[in-house]
Image (cartoon, helix red, strand yellow):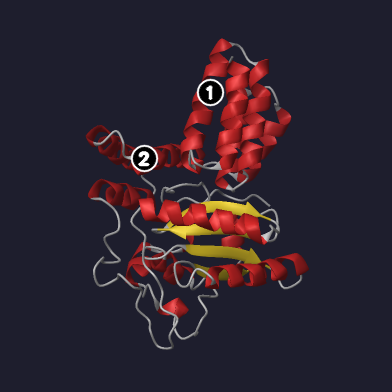
Amino acid sequence: MTNAFPPHEPASLRGAVDLSSLVHRDERRAADAAAPVAGTPGGYVAAVDDQSFGQVLELSRSVPVVLALWASWSEQSTQLVASLERLVNAREGRLVLAPADADRSPQLVQALQAQAIPTVVALVAGQPVPLFQGVQPDEVIDQVFDQLLEVAERNGVTGRVPAADGAEEVDGAADEPVEEPLPPLHQEAFDAISRGDYEAAASAYRTAIAQDPRDDLAVAGLAQANLLGRLHGKTLDEIRNRAAAAPTDLDAQLDVADLDLSGGHVDDAFARLLELFPTLDAAGRNRVRERLLELFQVVGVEDPRVAAARRRLAMLLY
């Protein structure tokens, strides 16, 4: 079966898995941001599926959401969800856990291009940030959560969900409206990508960068808009089949690296291009270097996978 790449995908703050094609823009804006987590004393869990995803997406504009794709038939994934719930609860409302049953959420599975259960992705200000696949030790997850909260704080997402029954407002919501978490040019870019206009989104981000060269969010958004533009109109099967049939075709390999990153397979994307790099001429190496630098921005330069890939690239260059 041929899977079309999702056509409407907002740019990610840090990360390439994009879920917003599952939600109509008007429904997303009308959703009640706090409703998914109401009424669970001591718990910060909001089960989600294809239909309710818009509410969780809106909630992420005030507090980071950890989206865990799991399945009842996978013992590892049920164990991981239990660990995630415990570790999220320990953050006392600074994070919310949104477990999604893969069997009941086929659109989420497709949008994530999930090739393993469990898959864990964060949502920050309506934007996806890939975290990890498979089971991880608690200490590793704790470190990931620390990094996630740092990313959220840099992007103004600092709300807290109260644990008391009936307390449905996210702390800080009265002082910081849910509908205005992004600067105007960033919101312009988000809206442009919501309607599939990637060039307009890239233009808005370039303007933001021109106004403030230190705007890391705009740099990451531009890289993501470019990535989505390159993938738009192509299918998963088309990209993978072309790359498999032509392992030395640079364009084909760049496309599949984009695809891997968009599905959260960050290490695979980096490894593909780094292994290809030594086989290319000077012009080809320069294209791969530029693409890697752009993908580093999509994932986030503070990500340890980026640091490892950057070191390997430096060794290949020098």
Dots 1 and 2: beta carbons under 8 Å?
A: no
Q: Disc 1 marks which residue?
A: 289
- The kind of residue on which mark 1 rests is Arg
Which comes sooner in the sequence, label 1 or label 2? 2
Confirm whether residue 316 shows in the render.
Answer: yes
Give the x, y percent position of residue 298: 47, 41
Query: Residue 302 has which mark?
Result: none
- The kind of residue on which mark 2 rests is Asp
Identity of the residue drawn at 47% across and 59% down: 123
In this rendering, position of residue 20 left or right of residue 254? left
Identity of the residue drawn at 66% across and 54% down: 133
Residue 216 appears in which quarter of the rendering?
Answer: top left
Query: Is disc 2 surrounded by few (<14), some (14 to 19) or many (20+) residues within 10 Å?
Result: some
Q: Disc 2 marks which residue?
A: 216
* Residue closer to the observer: 278 or 254: 278
Q: Residue furthest bottom?
A: 165
